[in-house]
Amino acid sequence: MKKTPIIIIVSIIALTAIGFGLYTLTVQPTTTSTPPSASVVSPQTSSSPEASNPVTAAELAKNNGQNGSACWIAVNGTVYDVTGNAAFGDGTHKPYSSQVQCGQDESAAIGKSPHGESVLSKLPVIGPLAN
């Protein structure tokens, strides 16, 4: 039995897998646009959200994810942009739609969540919440 066809098939599979791996490394995820009034600071570039303009409670409330508005939440004095996040839709956090909603301070709710605050480091920071 000739081994040449088997070697060719295995080589093709290996090259396809390598090519797919390289493709997934170079493809950038799509991002949602933020309102012009918001200055989003990437959590990786700024560890101090206090450098941004404070977000008022009224501005936070406007960004409730309804009618095409952005979806922001505040946690422990910092406002995060969750617009386009798969866990949020129509201004609510799935499956906790009655408990966690955009446009609100969710400091108490995140402490009760199964993921805790660990997910916040992956979100864009809008700025500090004004007192």
Image (tube, grey):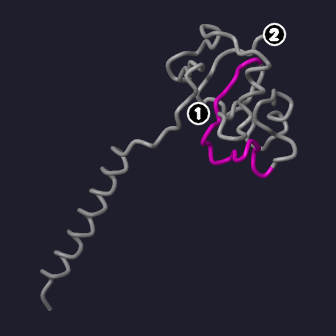
Which element is circle 1 on? helix
The disc at residue 36 is none
Please tell me which residue is depicted at 50% across the width and 18% down the height of the picture.
45
Q: Which percent across, then down, holds residue 78? A: 71, 20
Q: How many marks?
A: 2
Q: Which residue is mark 1?
A: 122
Q: Which percent across, then down, holds residue 7? A: 18, 75
Q: Earlier in the sequence, mark 1 or mark 2?
A: 1
Q: Which percent across, then down, holds residue 125? A: 61, 23
Q: Quadrant of the N terminus?
A: bottom left
Please tell me which residue is depicted at 68% across the width and 35% down the height of the picture.
71
Q: CA distance from mark 1 to mark 2?
A: 24 Å
Task: Answer with left or right where residue 99 lies relative to residue 83.
Answer: right
Name which residue type carries label 2. Asn
Q: Which residue is mark 2?
A: 131
Task: Answer with left or right where residue 58 lies relative to residue 46.
Answer: right
- Compared to residue 129, the image places residue 62 above or below, namely below
The range drawn in magenta is: 77-95
